Image (cartoon, grey):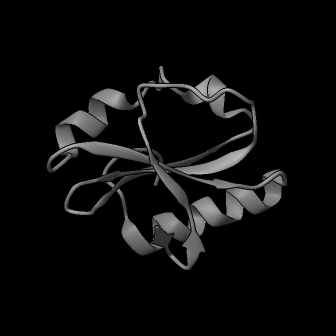
Amino acid sequence: MNIAGYNFDGPYDPDKGFTKDFAAVYSIVDDKPKVVDVGQTNNINDRFPNHERKPCWLRNKDGEIHLYIYKEESEKNRLRIESEIRGVYNPPCGER
């Protein structure tokens, strides 16, 4: 899925983890499709499946929620990409 010009992999189930650890920017997208949240992590399995903002996702979704990921090792790049996506989509969950 193209999100703000970045090709994200997915959809994945946000209620499941991954077999390998990796750094990524992640986006929660509903069926509309609407970007409900975006974030970044050094270890995807530290965030999923037990993400603390899940209640916000459930309150703000239309249909089901899906996880999309963009693998990126550099924290500086992850933070920049997250900020760009927040600026474009203004998701209802997470820091603004």
Q: Residue furthest left?
A: 62
Q: Closer to the camera, 17 or 26?
A: 17
Q: Is residue 45 above or below residue 58?
A: above
Query: Is 74 left, or right, of 22 in this rendering?
Result: right
Q: Is residue 41 above or below residue 28?
A: above
Q: Residue at x 76, y 55 (%)?
A: 72
Number of numbered discs: 0
The image position of residue 91, as x and y in percent, is 35, 57
Q: Residue furthest front?
A: 19
Query: Is 8 left, or right, of 62 in this rendering?
Result: right
Q: Closer to the camera, 11 or 53?
A: 11
The image position of residue 29, as x and y in percent, is 35, 53
The image position of residue 35, as x and y in percent, is 35, 59
Q: Is residue 71 above or below residue 89?
A: above
Q: Residue at x 50, y 76 (%)?
A: 4
Q: Residue furthest top?
A: 50
Q: Residue furthest right?
A: 74
Q: Residue at x 29, y 43 (%)?
A: 65
Please identify the quarter of the rendering in which residue 83 is found. Answer: bottom right
Q: Closer to the camera, 8 or 53?
A: 8
Q: Residue at x 40, y 31 (%)?
A: 53
Q: Is residue 15 above or below residue 6?
A: above
